[in-house]
Amino acid sequence: MTPAPRIRVAIVGGSGYGGGELLRLLLSHPRVEIATVTAYRSAGKPVSEIHRNLRGVTDLVFSGTSPAEAARGTEAVFVALPTEEAGAAAAEIVRSGVRVVDLSGAFRVRDAAEHKAFYGGDPPAPDLRPGFVYGLTEWARPKLREARAVANPGCFATAAELALLPLAEAGLLRGPVIVDGKTGSSGAGADPLPTTHHPARAQGFWTYKPLAHQHTPEIAQALRDAGAKDLDLTFVPHSAPMVRGIFATAYATVAADDGARVESLYRDRYAKEPFVRYVPGSPDVNVVAGSNFADVSVAVRGTRVVAFCALDNLVKGGAGQAVQNLNAMMGWPERQGLEFPGMMP
């Protein structure tokens, strides 16, 4: 059997954790060839010198070329730069006519005032923003098929949205909603910080950016788009003593006569999803670590609903969802290049 033709892709910003995960996934993708991977501070270095897990897997060398040059001759580019750098890079690629999947927060929030309030600067490329599809794959699938530019969701946002999406779509999500999120240290990126230093993190547990985290407007926007009414969102993230993982607990209230059907809503909504699994009891970050799976469950008592989601922040919460979105954009099976389970133990 003749193998399926491959497309050439580039990664702009390949030296961080997100770029490393893109490399790990795309090097095994049956329909993709990585043409270029950039990392300006590491230009000229072998990829495997930075990402030591890729020794013997690839001979790629980091390039210092511009985003537009990296995009030349490719069919899609992944941007894995910090938000303050990613906006200009993604805009440059879009203007060159090449598909882009941006893993940063540069194009996620439509409202310019909210973007400025939570990200601390004016949103980049206002003329291009309407063309970016917000890439929560399970919600955006119809738009992704025609998309040329995708804003990949944040890790906390993906977990919160998957936990609450069935309620929003059914018109049951309204009023005050609380999301409590826990994340592993890899969510802080590859550059070491006092809060990611092992002695501080190994047994520590604390909150950060309460009521001010940049994923807050993104979560609210996605849930309103899905059908939430009069939403009043409170989001509080926490740093947990683990390397990989997001665990989101979401609290909501439904009408008295709706509680009985909530669990069936979740089971039905996710029954045919390739990467979202409805599980009994509690999800567990250990089960999904290293995979593109998100495990979801829900508990109901009367009018009170508590929904849970566990996922790997670097895979389903980042690079894995980006690859899943590329698959959807290209009309390929979404599982392609992502068909591996989590690691246990």
Image: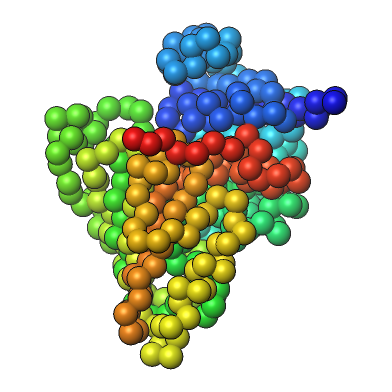
Between 70 and 154, which is closer to the camera in this rendering? 154
Q: Residue at x 18, y 49 (%)?
A: 206
Residue 258 visible in the shown view: yes
Q: Is residue 168 left or right of residue 141?
A: left
**Quarter of the view holding residue 8:** top right
Is the residue 69 above or below the residue 329 in the image? Answer: above
Between 43 and 281, which is closer to the camera in this rendering? 281
**Quarter of the view holding residue 90:** top right
Q: Residue at x 45, y 67 (%)?
A: 164
Residue 313 visible in the shown view: no
- Percent x, y for residue 258? 45, 86
Between 215 and 227, which is closer to the camera in this rendering? 227
Q: Residue at x 30, y 35 (%)?
A: 243
Q: Residue at x 52, y 73 (%)?
A: 265
Q: Is residue 124 left or right of residue 303?
A: right
State the quadrant of the N terminus: top right
- Percent x, y for residue 103? 52, 41
- Percent x, y for residue 119? 39, 50
